[in-house]
Image (cartoon, rainbow, N blue to C red):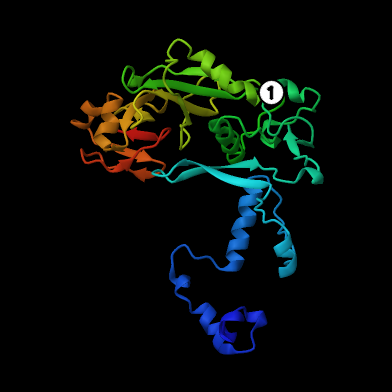
Amino acid sequence: MTELYTHQRPFQVLEPHAIDLHWGHSILEEPSFLAPWSAIDQAADLALELGEPGHIVVTNFAFPSSKRMRTRSKRVSFDEQVQVFLGKDAIQKFHPERTCLNDLDPVDGAAEVPQYVYGRQTTTGAAGSSTPGSSSSAPASHLLDRRLPNDLAGYIHHLQQLWRDDHIRLQSGEQYSLRTCFLHHVHQRCWKVPRVVRLPDDPRLWHAFILHTWRDQLHNDEPLNVAVAFPRVRSRPSTVAIHADVILTQGAHDECGGLVTVYPPGSEDDMHYIWAASYPRHVSGWQILDGVGASELVQTHACDLFHGGVVVPVTTQPTHIMANGHSFVAVF
């Protein structure tokens, strides 16, 4: 190994040519390349979003001598905190999840992994337990300040993060409300009348409340997908405040459930309607309108179709890649 290769870091190098080799490498031209200081900043931001400590930990260690390596048996160990990304590769949306491993020798003793229950750190109970009775003695805190158990459904974590980002912090005693719709891609491809679910204070009970609300429609022998509508759907004036929309879908795995808000021509702002519909993965603007009964209006009126501020062309050519929970706004 040459001297120029060994000493490439600027603070270790005495030869200027080595610095040119380091910062002139072709990897710097790749789109995904990050400078060391940029990588540290992004890692700190991600750690802050996930509620993990943002400080950098540097561990110094020394390799054992070669003689000791021959006498000791070889062993492979893993870090106690492993980050796993769950999601569909085609959509390229992943949700980080923490998993704890313990590969210590019995002589070292069992390790206790700290748990967070309702915002308070403790080391008792199972890791990430979602049993309602396990934290009965913990003081209640606001939902947005809690660290939810890891084994809760992904959409529950999504709801908490959504309300954090939008600063929807309810007062003590108030309940979050969901507007929910159900779709079966074979038997029920459109849903017009949503059902409102008032969520209890304990997020570990939310999934059971939602399933109980739709028990008359669910197929027990088919997988269920629950997705939060995004971008957020504008709520019509009503006596019940809607804090988020959720779509439950079953049926064909190659289709998705979406939510469309339609403003008919000449209607007032509070006369729009919100329907849920089944769509293929690759959908056109005309298909989006046809799924909610608005395709006939396109023949006589101009229409602007939006998804999160992005215009979707109202043509028969598929231009939008669907995902469960996508919401649209159609203005005639």
Task: Tell which residue pokes out farthest to the top in this image.
Answer: 216
- Residue 252 vs 36, above or below: the answer is above
- Asked if one can make out residue 279 in the rendered structure from this viewpoint, the answer is yes
- Residue 253, image quadrant: top left
Neighbor class of circle 1 (other Cα within 10 Å; few <14, some 14-19, many 20+) is: few
At mark 1, the secondary structure is loop
Q: Position of residue 211 (x, y in %)?
A: 52, 17
Residue at 66 percent of width and 51 percent of height: 77
Residue at 60 percent of width and 30 percent of height: 152
Q: Inspect the image, locate mark 1, and give the three-letter code of the amino acid beneath it.
A: Thr
- Asked if one can make out residue 119 in the rendered structure from this viewpoint, the answer is no
Q: Nearer the viewer, residue 317 or 125?
A: 125
- Residue 14 vs 199, above or below: the answer is below
- Residue 31, image quadrant: bottom left
Q: Position of residue 122 (x, y in %)?
A: 79, 35
Q: Position of residue 270 (x, y in %)?
A: 42, 25
- Residue 137, image quadrant: top right
Residue at 62 percent of width and 47 percent of height: 82
Q: Position of residue 174 (x, y in %)?
A: 66, 22
Callout count? 1
Residue at mark 1: 131
- The quadrant of the picture occupied by the N terminus is bottom right
